[in-house]
Amino acid sequence: MSRLQKVHVAGAGIGAIAAGFVMGGIGYLPFGVPGLVVGVVIGAAIGAIVGHRSIEAVDPRGDLGHFQQVYRTTGYYADGMAWDDYAPAYQLGLDTFERRQRDPDLTGAELEARWPAVRGGSRLEFAQAYPAVQHVWRELGQRERALRDSEAGAPRGS
């Protein structure tokens, strides 16, 4: 499972419809139309959550999928570039995130030297790719801080 969420509309929608149908039927049997309405609402909500999480758990793209969904909306996106141009930059960010946490002095120059070996068929020059790498670091750093903060606020066991 990836650390960053992706949007899984189809999985959530199918889950919502299926669970809404089942729960609506269950609610209708003893309570009639009011039970149907309540069952559909509750079933749809639960089904959407379960459907999304189920698809997220088996999504083979991992964290790259999150960036695949958002790369065209970023400020550094260059018109005419495709996902295949940005994917190596995001992968470089994912691959170097842990090292960056241990060594904040990891420099752009080091990554620039590595770029020709990892870029594959990307048309991006390193100066265009580096903001995507930094985007990965920011997103994963924010996610890790949020997890630490939530764990710090959670009640401790005895």
Image (cartoon, rainbow, N blue to C red):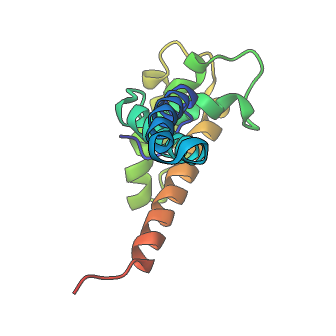
Q: Residue reaching furthest top?
A: 121
Inspect this view and state whether residue 157 appears. yes
Q: Is residue 136 above or below residue 70?
A: below
The answer to whether residue 90 is visible is no
- At which x and y percent is residue 30? 45, 46
Name the one closer to the observer, 72 or 53.
53
The quadrant holding residue 57 is top left
The count of marks equals 0
Of all residues, the one furthest to the left in this rendering is 158
Relative height, residue 155 to residue 124 (above, below): below
Question: What residue is rendered at 50% in x and 31% in y?
Answer: 21
Q: As rendered, which of 140 and 123 lies closer to the eye?
A: 140
Q: Is residue 114 above or below residue 41?
A: above
Q: Position of residue 150 (x, y in %)?
A: 46, 70
**Picture coordinates of residue 120, whole percent (x, y):** 47, 16
- Quadrant in which residue 75 is drawn: top right
Q: Is 148 placed left or right of 136 in the picture? A: left
Foreground of the two, 151 or 119:
151
Which residue appears at 50% of the width and 56% of the height? 143
Give me the residue at 58% from left, 25% from top: 86
Question: Is the residue 69 above or below the residue 131 in the image?
Answer: above
146 relative to 69 in the view: left or right: left
Report x, y in % for residue 153: 45, 79
- Residue at horizontal 72 percent and vertical 37 percent from the top: 74
